[in-house]
Amino acid sequence: MKKLVLLAIAALALIGCENPQNTVNTLTKEIAQFRATPNDQSQMAIEQSFAKLDRQIEELENKGKTTEAANLRSQEATLRTEYAAAKVAKTVQDAANAIHGVGTALKEAGQSIGDVFRGSTNSSE
């Protein structure tokens, strides 16, 4: 019975101590997904994962594991750069969609005006 309790405590301890590399891997996947289909929900998940990774790195630094923390900070910086690039690509795509929408609206307006003039020319004949 005592062994069972110790195993349960050990399992709970492992659950509480998440591996920061798993967070890095999660961020990598989340950023790739955001790049493919950018949306607000993905952005929130990425921001939460970055906050989690920051906490994990701080914990390592507080424990004196500076080499591991520095390695993770480097990976985090790379991921932040990739995320920023994905956000810029989303912004450019949003702008292109908006410009396309304005162009379409102008084209339709021009056609409507042309139809009005053609109609008035036909009725004056």
Image (tube, rainbow, N blue to C red):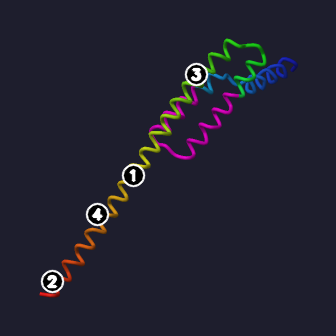
Numbered disc 4: secondary structure: helix
The disc, 4 or 2, on the residue closer to the chain's N-terminal end is: 4
Q: CA distance from mark 4 to mark 3?
A: 48 Å
Report how far apart the C-alphas of labels 4 and 2 lie in the structure.
22 Å
Query: Residue 101, how many percent across, how many down?
Result: 37, 58
Q: Nearer the viewer, mark 2 or mark 3?
A: 2
The answer to whether marks 1 and 3 mark residues whose Cβ atoms lie closer than 8 Å is: no
Q: Where residue 10 sits in the image (x, y, percent)?
A: 79, 20
Circle 4: residue type: Lys
Three-letter code, disc 2 = Asn
- Residue, disc 2: 122
Task: Count residues near mark 1 (Cα–Cα under 10 Å), then give few for <14, some for 14-19, many for 20+.
Answer: few
| Residue picked out by circle 4 | 107
Q: Which residues are magenta?
A: 25-54
Question: Mark 2: which secondary structure?
Answer: helix
Image quarter of residue 4:
top right
Q: Residue at x 21, y 78 (%)?
A: 117
Identify residue type, mark 1: Asn
Taking 82 as reference, is 3 above or below it? above
Left or right of 83 on screen, residue 2: right
Q: Identify the residue under disc 1.
A: 97
Check contact, mark 4 vs mark 3: CB within 8 A.
no
Q: Earlier in the sequence, mark 2 or mark 3?
A: 3
Q: Earlier in the sequence, mark 1 or mark 4?
A: 1
Q: Is residue 23 above or below residue 109?
A: above
Q: Residue at x 53, y 31 (%)?
A: 29
Q: Is residue 122 left or right of residue 7?
A: left
- Check disc 3 and report the residue beneath it: 75
